[in-house]
Image (tube, rainbow, N blue to C red):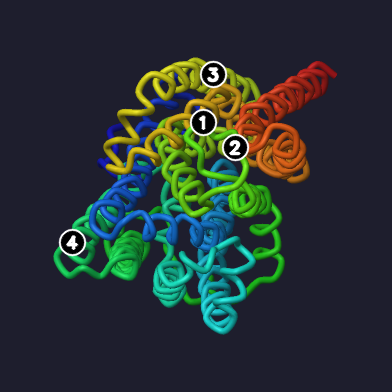
Amino acid sequence: MMRRRGTAPSRDELGTAPIGRLVVGMSVPSILGVMAYNLYNLLDMLLLSRGAGIDAVGGVAASFPLFVMLSAVATTLGSGAASLMSRAFGRGDDETAARIAANTFLAFYAVAITVTVLGLVFLDPMLGAMGVTDTLLPQARGYTRIILIGAVTGTGFSNLIRAEGASRYAMAIWVIPLSVNIALDALFVFGLSMGAVGAALGTVLGQCVSMAMSVNFFVVSGRSRLRLRPRHFRPSPAVIGSILAIGAPTLLQLCGQSLAVIAVNRMLAGFGADPTPSAYGGDADLAIGAYGLAARLNALLLFPVTGLAQGIQPIIGFNHGARKPERVRGTVRLATLVAAVYGVAASLLAWRAGPLLLRLMTPDDATVRYGAAVLAIMSAGSACTGVAQIQATCAQAVGRRLAATVLSLLGQVIVFIPTATALAARFGPAGIWWAFPASAAVASVAGSWWTWRLAGRVRARASA
């Protein structure tokens, strides 16, 4: 039976359609959405660099961990709820799925309001703890204040929309608001010379568009499979607890990214900005700005893997709930292969095209030289990073909370921060950059071992 475009796929499609076609159908819209987000991050930096100078770039880059932590709240609730909803849909339990979605909304807005109040009260001490230098503080303060005020608009709940199978709308809820954001950034930064404050204002207004589209999907348009009623919005500690427990790996992963950025920024404050990234002493502001640009380019190169991971999560969750382990294994195998092959290609692209990519972002020669060297080293472990991300997504989708948490943290915190600290003490800033591929390799080996063990246990139960 044909289904209307943009609506959720039927249970038969998720449970019986060829895995390759299903992975492509669910992942491509996610990949396009993630691509739009990462392009936005790059264009945001480009506009700031060209329109407000490298200090504005450094200020936003140094305060970016707070933005990531705010996003982590929405993504944690969204990924936890999406996992639970996918399995509920697999069981045919739409009533439970509706209660999960409604409690997700309640939890997000409660946390967002709390973060806004506390963040505004303790803004300067918080920025200082993140490694923001005195030179960059005015830019970072202006940017972060606006982001905190707009925290309640910080998500369109695309994970929940994707859990219903409406991957096209989930893509649109990224692409359309980000397009608005970019246009407003250009107006505020170039047209009105508002600098970092203008970039933050554009971000918040773009988020308002995303929020409006979310309301349209769940309440107005009738696209959603869910029929939300007032009874679904009754707070349920059990439901919220389950959402947080499942989403905890995502929270820890994103907070881990922020902790890693903070750790790197603080280490860079003691090192120089020599273009060979191996010297001590010098201008820490330039080093932080170059790292911020390189990190965003690296994220852009890896966006297909992030979109792939988002796309396969509802497939794995649905088939796990429907007790079809062979389809879970097939999905994970295919996604792992794609992530590994693409990661190798991304590493080669960063190595060859790094200087050109940095030159597009900034006219500053020192930043280009430094950033290109950093990007080449950071991206050397892209294949391992992709494989590790797929394995962590699998663990989360099937509800293995502890495994998902550990796998999410290995490459970014548990292994990375001690490794970066030790290598920086021995080799200077170059040691920090080589810690990225080294920790990714450890995470991918651990994730592959866990997935192999899980598959063995599932086969043993099936044959018993």
Q: Position of residue 189 (x, y in %)?
A: 23, 63
* Label ID, residue 340: 3
Rendered image quadrant of residue 117? bottom right
Task: Give the residue type that dot 1 points to.
Answer: Thr
Task: Give the residue type that dot 3 points to.
Answer: Ala
Task: Give the residue type that dot 2 points to.
Answer: Ala
Residue identified by numbered label 2:
279
Which of the marked residues, 3 or 2, is nearer the chain's N terminus? 2
Which marked residue is nearer to the observer: mark 4 or mark 1? 1
Residue identified by numbered label 1:
276
Which marked residue is nearer to the observer: mark 4 or mark 3? 4
* Label ID, residue 190: 4
Q: Position of residue 443 (x, y in %)?
A: 70, 30
Q: Residue at x 47, y 66 (%)?
A: 135
Q: Position of residue 260 (x, y in %)?
A: 63, 48
Disc 3, SS? helix
Rendered image quadrant of residue 195? bottom left
* Label ID, residue 93: none
